[in-house]
């Protein structure tokens, strides 16, 4: 077997554990120097390939690569950039081949979500369509948990844990204060299209009446009257009401609640913030004092409270991607296969990229209670294993020690290219 | 020495470690059954005393009391309720004495901030002014870190750690995304009157150019032009800009930026949210894509990332409060004395309540850099020790196990009282 180099890139929104996948890819590749030469990482994802900005990861020590396992975010930079189809933009694909050829790249590892799987699929067809021998393997990642064919998307378990832990803690706080102060707390979480992340908040509630009392899902049309009645009933029964709301909640006409036509003092339309919208609605209609939080990037970057299971799976899919490549496979994605719910057992399988790209996995309706305000036992059975285990990063002087690789670029061999 | 019972209450906004102080009080009292009988905890703070809603903590197992050390929030309920002066509302004080007498309460432990210290001071004067023998000890607590006479207020170190860790993590995320997506991230933190919490965010930045790049303090009048210039310069130099903003930031006329006259679709004035205000200002004037987060209660409830130092200190002031009582002291507060910066060494001293009540400790101007956008070395020297050490709570099935004591009330002996 000839030695060929590898290209690895991170794509789309980053997660607390995508670097653990990078670690899995690079550490595994390093074990096979007879087959894989250098792993080049794209600076800012696929853009790095197009612009020939290739990070030479061989310059990084084993310690630095190992530290990626506990470092959140995309260490090599990510991007939001989707390749057009071969028909629409053949130039881009020719450019990729030019760069890959110049650097003897025979393996393409693309670490991302649905859009990235589509890009990876297109790249995997280069071999056949453009006569350049290349194996393209997709490494799954997305906090949105919307990839098909895998039990879970690495990145999701850690957001899920962050959300469940945070709403539990904040709800304990509100419970203390409710007698004379805050009675309603609203926490906004990510998930524009699906309620996976919001559902995870439900894990904080382990018995009847425990917070969060209400979860608002993008899957359920927002019904103001039913919601307010539920809030009132909850405050009357439990003294307070704790709410998790997905950023993607919409009214029956399909409008995001966050785009409630709010304008600032200058008349500019204000975007975002379904939590304040909901909280103020409660205050206006029911008079309760409220607090609200918007976790935003904190939730997907929170490596300090990462799920141990998620970290292991993120590493495993990176490792498997390289093993698949060494087996000569192309156009596939390592997938996590659930063998058992409790105790959770999982293994690594594989999925064809053609079955993954552009397919969005939605949350099943049976994961949401009939009244639309909470999760069911089926959801708990699915979600609970994903947040199990802690994987505390190392701390120095009270702060988690995250690594910043040097990211030195290899010398360019091609002409500049305008993306 | 006669055996007398004790009253303990939590007051004001709760913290990640106020229950550690409760644990210190109760565990220490249990070691002296020859002097202290039952510790009664006020249900919802001082209101519990006025309404004779006294939680019998002797019914709680040693295990439950020990678990308070790792449980955030106020386990017995807190309140926002300030006693008026003896002259203004003598009835309330007579009621307190009625309840204390009925339950043989000779020790009063009040766990709170500045307002509570004032209440505790008033109660401490009951002995003399109303002839009822009572020792009142204040147990310091407040995330705002604004009590004088103590190196730090228990509760602050854990918020500080949460904020520093969170802004580090989110900034790693933004750094990954900045090439094609988010370039500016704004995180709003607590601190209506003083910038202690915002300052703690500065600990995430350990070298020139590291995030957060800008901190907006309540102590510094907000100057839009200077701020925008700094954001622009930062994005041009570092590719992105990460900002911590205190909820208390004001313009030169003293108006909170969060009250920027925003109205919702119905014309209702929108309160709160300086982070979106700042983020949208950046987008409007500089065009950068932004994200923002509002941590709100998550920050002060985040026991999962509590500072080990803070937990120890919170316990120690609870323990010392009981020891002071056993020494016959009245009208005092255990204080944390800094013996050395690095390595941090501290001991427990004491302060007179008369010197603590209604005195607000502001952050020194020399803790803020001359340009007003970051912290100085002096601030680091002060802040850094306070976030050191981790004190992970126990986890079961991936979730931190926080305790809810039974909170059984003792039988009432007095007539009802209307607060």
Image (tube, coloured by chain):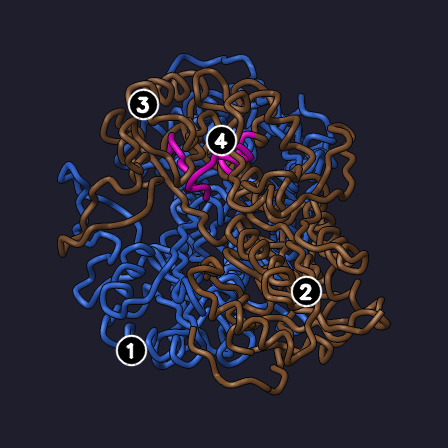
Chain colours: A blue, B brown
Residues at circles 3 and 4 in contact by the CB criterion of under 8 Å: no
Q: Which subunit holds the residue at mark 2?
A: B
State which tag comes first along the sequence, 1 or 4.
4
Q: Which residue is mark 3?
A: B223
In the picture, the disc for residue B300 is none
The range drawn in magenta is: B182-202
Estimate the spatial distance between the alpha carbons at disc 3 and disc 4, rounded to whole Å.
32 Å
State which tag comes first along the sequence, 3 or 2.
2
Q: Which subunit holds the residue at mark 3?
A: B
Secondary structure at numbered mark 2: loop
**Eye-nearest disc, 1 or 4:** 1
Vertical relation: B68 (above or below) A103: below
Q: Is residue A68 left or right of residue B282?
A: right
Query: Which residue is at a point 34% across and 22% down the rendered structure image?
Result: B227
Decide: few, some or many residues near mark 2? Use Cα within 10 Å; few <14, some 14-19, many ≥20.
Answer: many
Residue B61 in view here = yes
Q: Which residue is mark 4?
A: A77
Q: Which of these two is toward me, A45 or B169?
A: B169
The picture quadrant where one finds residue A79 is top left
Decide: few, some or many residues near mark 3? Use Cα within 10 Å; few <14, some 14-19, many ≥20.
Answer: few
The picture quadrant where one finds residue A287 is bottom left
Estimate the spatial distance between the alpha carbons at disc 1 and disc 4, rounded to whole Å.
46 Å
Estimate the spatial distance between the alpha carbons at disc 3 and disc 1, rounded to whole Å.
44 Å
Residue A12 locus on image (x, y percent): 42, 41
Q: Which residue is mark 2?
A: B134
Residues at circles 1 and 2 in contact by the CB criterion of under 8 Å: no
Secondary structure at numbered mark 4: loop
Quadrant containing the C terminus of chain B is: bottom left
Q: Which of these two is toward me, A149 or A314?
A: A314
């Amino acid at each position: 077997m000839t030695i060929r180099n590898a290209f690895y890139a991170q794509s789309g929104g980053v997660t607390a554990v995508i670097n653990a996948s990078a670690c899995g890819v690079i550490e595994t590749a390093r074990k096979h120097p007879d087959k894989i030469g250098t792993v080049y990482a794209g600076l800012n994802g696929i853009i790095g390939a197009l612009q020939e900005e290739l990070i030479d990861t061989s310059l990084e020590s084993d310690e630095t690569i190992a530290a990626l396992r506990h470092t959140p975010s995309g260490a090599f930079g990510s991007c939001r950039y989707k390749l057009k189809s071969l028909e629409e933009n053949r130039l881009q694909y020719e450019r990729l081949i030019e760069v890959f050829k110049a650097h003897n790249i025979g393996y393409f590892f693309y670490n991302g979500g649905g859009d990235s799987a589509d890009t990876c699929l297109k790249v995997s067809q280069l071999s056949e369509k453009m006569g350049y021998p290349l194996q393209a393997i997709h490494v799954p990642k997305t906090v949105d948990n919307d990839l098909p064919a895998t039990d879970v998307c690495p990145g999701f378990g850690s957001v899920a844990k962050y959300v469940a832990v945070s709403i539990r803690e904040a709800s304990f706080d509100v419970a203390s204060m409710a007698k004379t102060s805050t009675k309603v707390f609203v926490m906004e979480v990510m998930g524009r299209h699906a309620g996976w992340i919001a559902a995870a908040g439900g894990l904080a509630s382990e018995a009847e009446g425990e917070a969060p009392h209400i979860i608002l899902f993008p899957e359920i049309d927002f019904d103001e009257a039913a919601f307010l009645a539920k809030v009132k009933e909850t405050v009357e029964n439990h003294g307070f009401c704790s709410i998790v709301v997905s950023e993607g909640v919409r009214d029956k006409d399909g409008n995001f609640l966050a785009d409630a036509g709010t304008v600032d003092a200058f008349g500019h339309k204000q975007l975002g913030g379904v939590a304040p919208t909901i909280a103020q609605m409660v205050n206006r209609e029911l008079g309760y004092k409220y607090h609200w939080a918007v976790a935003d990037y904190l939730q997907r970057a929170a490596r300090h409270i990462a799920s141990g299971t998620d970290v292991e799976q993120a590493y495993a899919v990176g490792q498997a991607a390289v093993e698949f490549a060494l087996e000569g496979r192309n156009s596939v994605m390592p997938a996590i296969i659930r063998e058992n719910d409790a105790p959770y057992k999982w293994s690594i399988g594989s999925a064809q990229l053609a079955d993954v790209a552009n397919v969005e996995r939605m949350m099943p309706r049976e994961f949401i209670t009939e009244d639309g305000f909470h999760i069911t036992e089926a959801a708990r059975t699915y979600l609970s294993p994903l947040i199990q285990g802690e994987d505390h990063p190392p701390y120095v002087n009270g702060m988690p020690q995250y690594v910043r690789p040097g990211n030195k670029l290899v010398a360019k061999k091609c002409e500049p290219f305008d993306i």
